[in-house]
Image: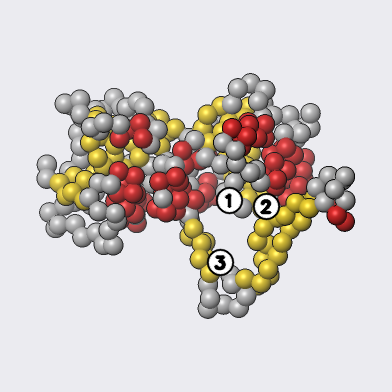
Amino acid sequence: MSQIYFNKRRIRKLNLPESYSLESIQIGVPVKKDEDKKVGLNSIGDVVLPSEDYGVQSRRNAYGYSYPDKTKPKERRYVSTNWIYPFGNTNASEIPVDIYRECFPKVEVPPYEIHLMLTENDDNERFVIVDLDARVRNEHLKDAVNLMLEIYGECYIFDGEIKIKRNIKKRKIGWEILPQGEMPSRHCERQFTKYRKKPNGFLFYRLEYIEKYDVIDAAEGLNGFRGYFAYVFNNCCVLESAVYGNATYIIHRENWEELSQQTKKKLFDENMIIDKVVHDKSWKRNIARAFVKLGVLRK
């Protein structure tokens, strides 16, 4: 099995030799030290969306990106939320104030959502490989190579599939259930205190509001899902973007861990998203209405 080796920061073009088949190539690196542990892969068959911490490519892979369309006129758009004391009264509770500005329209580019997998061949050699589905093979091969280069500083393209043992079952690693009774707002608050980071008040505002309802389980996103929390109710699951994103997504409770790791496009196409509540000044009212429709009860 021949291979192409890269050890640069990134590539601008990917030109495969004619002898390489797009349907059978694999992209990855052999596990020599801790290549698997570096991205949170522990067992054969684990599949992970890499954390955004590695750099620009990883952030775009996990969350997508946007850029201003300067060919169109500016529009008034929400840009942030400030927490202030009403009328300067420091004895009162802070309230959120939405900030709007004239901005060029944004072009939203969806995340690549390239996952990595830990596998093993018949010689018991381990590899971290890109989980190449048809979408990635046809649209994001260069992005997959650049993702591996950003994480590891090197990358191989193997001509022909690595012989993966047939009994390997994929297991996506994206969420960790929080201890019984522990809510995301308190968990997140402790993390900020531990690492001495300044919290974003609006983050706690949304989390704390959802926690007024009868939550059965709560989970924290791992790796590429960090900054997200999942609230499991009787008949639905709420995915709240604590740091990233611009909306709250409500999905079906059944198989919520697997559903939450699908692309948003696939979830919409298959009608798996029950509701989407945009993060704006009407968020609290709209999420309350959605909960009423779904029969989600307050504590």
Tell me which amino acid carries mark 2. Answer: His
Instruction: Assign a secondary structure to mark 2.
Output: loop
Tell me which amino acid carries mark 3. Answer: Lys
Residue 109 in percent (x, y) is at 48, 60
Spatial CA distance of label 2 from label 1 is 9 Å
- The residue that mark 2 highlights is 279
Q: Is residue 149 left or right of residue 19?
A: right
* Nearest to N terminus: mark 2 or mark 3: 3
Residue 17 in percent (x, y) is at 14, 57
* Nearest to N terminus: mark 2 or mark 1: 1
Q: Nearer the viewer, residue 160 or 227?
A: 227
Check whether the beta carbons of the residues at disc 2 and disc 1 lie within 8 A of each other: yes
Residue 106: assigned label: 3
Quadrant including the C terminus: top right
- The residue that mark 1 highlights is 245
Check whether the beta carbons of the residues at disc 3 and disc 1 lie within 8 A of each other: no
Say if 40 sits above or below 83 in the image.
above
Instruction: Assign a secondary structure to mark 1.
Output: loop
Q: Is residue 160 left or right of residue 61?
A: left
Q: Nearer the viewer, residue 153 or 281?
A: 153
Residue 125 in percent (x, y) is at 20, 29
Confirm whether residue 132 shows in the render: no
Tell me which amino acid carries mark 1. Answer: Gly
Say if 195 sits above or below 280 in the image.
above
Write the residue at 61% across / 53% down: 246
